[in-house]
């Protein structure tokens, strides 16, 4: 079995109570079927307590979200009550694996990292990015046609990621304002909850004027950050080609995501003296949480 992952996967360690955001602020946690079965058969007062915080919506289960917008199990010290009381194994898949995302096709397995986690972003933007590969036990062979298709997807993705090693390519993508009308309309259409403290269409148009000059002033820092951002997104979303999504749409999504993250950075940072990596982390996390992880917004970004 071939296992591929970005360098940020190795050595990642959750900040737990020291995390400035935590995974469960602003989101409801979807519960997988196996964990739900475990919670439903948990005996005694503990079982009743856990079940009293299950919410069913259109057949899917999640945990109660408090009026402050976080999971009911998030304790005042920033740690998870469920984990503290019942251990790591009690967590549902979403909580246990976040921010790691696995995908496999036959004997190929990849782990990508979710940029909604500030620690993932901090590691990604402060270390050189590479993609690593291990051979592990276990085979689920694809038929010959499947192997051929998978290899075409991985090769194409590899070439696109390699193109992002060229500074000129990164600069062209990030400072290209031709999609800004589209980005402004995405911003206008974003779900109401996503818009709080976010860009407005008017602000997108205003930032367009400053976009190229700001890049030139800070290119030494910005270029590797955006090369990494684009590469991580291509690595994660490139596998959509395996399900038949045209490469044109995948590439357009990654370009828009890079441009939108840049505009967010500019929006928050243009008046600051220095550009610190924290600003890139904040813009990337904001993009991931407000756009990428809201299905309606993601669809707007992927659409023509
Ligand atoms: S967002 Fe990342 S660092 Fe923060 S609690 Fe979640 S996994 Fe840990």
Image (tube, rainbow, N blue to C red):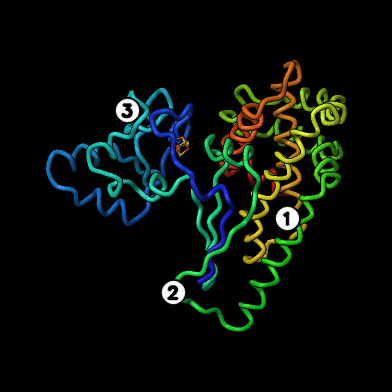
Residue 106 lies, with reference to residue 25, above or below; the image says below
Q: Secondary structure at mark 2?
A: loop
Q: For marks 3 and 1, give the one nearer the viewer.
A: 1
Q: Residue at x 32, y 56 (%)?
A: 34
Q: Residue at x 24, y 40 (%)?
A: 50
The residue that label 1 is drawn on is 161
Marked residue nearer the N-terminal end (3 or 1): 3
The residue that label 2 is drawn on is 138
Marked residue nearer the N-terminal end (2 or 1): 2
Residue 196 shows up from this direction:
yes
Marked residue nearer the N-terminal end (3 or 2): 3
The residue that label 3 is drawn on is 75
Q: Residue furthest left?
A: 44
Q: Position of residue 140 (x, y in %)?
A: 48, 76
Q: Position of residue 221 (x, y in %)?
A: 74, 33
Q: Residue at x 67, y 66 (%)?
A: 154
Mark 2 Cα within 10 Å, few/some/many (few <14, many 20+)? few
Q: Position of residue 205 (x, y in %)?
A: 82, 26
Q: Is mark 2 within 8 Å of ligand 1?
A: no
Between the residue at mark 3 and the residue at mark 1, the CA separation in whole angstroms equals 40 Å
Q: Position of residue 72 (x, y in %)?
A: 33, 31
Q: Residue 32's mark?
A: none
Q: Nearer the viewer, residue 302 or 239?
A: 239
Q: Nearer the viewer, residue 13 or 34?
A: 13
Residue 94 lies, with reference to residue 106, above or below; the image says above
Mark 1 Cα within 10 Å, few/some/many (few <14, many 20+)? many
Q: Nearer the viewer, residue 46 or 131?
A: 131
């Amino acid at each position: 079995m071939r296992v591929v992952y970005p360098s940020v996967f190795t050595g990642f360690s959750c900040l737990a109570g020291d995390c400035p955001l935590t995974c469960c602020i602003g989101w409801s946690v979807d519960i997988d079927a196996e964990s739900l079965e475990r919670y439903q058969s948990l005996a005694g007062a503990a079982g009743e307590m856990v079940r009293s915080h299950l919410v069913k919506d259109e057949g899917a289960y999640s945990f109660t979200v408090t009026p402050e917008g976080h999971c009911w199990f998030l304790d005042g010290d920033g740690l998870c009550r469920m984990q503290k009381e019942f251990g790591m194994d009690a967590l549902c898949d979403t909580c246990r694996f976040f921010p790691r995302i696995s995908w496999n096709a036959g004997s190929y397995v990849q782990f990508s990292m979710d940029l909604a986690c500030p620690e993932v972003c901090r590691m990604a933007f402060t270390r050189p990015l590479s993609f690593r590969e291990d051979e592990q036990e276990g085979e689920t062979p694809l038929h010959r046609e499947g192997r051929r298709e998978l290899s075409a997807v991985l090769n194409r993705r590899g070439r696109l990621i390699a193109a992002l090693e060229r500074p000129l390519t990164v600069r062209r993508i990030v400072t290209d304002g031709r999609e800004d009308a589209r980005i402004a309309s995405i911003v206008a259409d974003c779900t109401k909850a996503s818009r709080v403290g976010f860009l407005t269409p008017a602000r997108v148009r205003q930032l367009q004027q400053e976009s190229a000059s700001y890049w030139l002033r800070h290119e030494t820092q910005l270029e590797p950050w955006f090369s990494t951002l684009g590469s991580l997104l291509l690595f994660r979303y490139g596998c959509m080609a395996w399900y038949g999504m045209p490469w044109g749409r995948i590439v357009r999504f990654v370009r828009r995501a890079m441009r939108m993250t840049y505009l967010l950075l500019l929006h928050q940072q243009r008046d600051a003296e220095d550009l610190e990596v924290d600003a890139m982390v904040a813009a990337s996390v904001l993009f991931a949480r407000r756009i990428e992880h809201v299905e309606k917004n993601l669809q707007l970004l992927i659409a023509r």
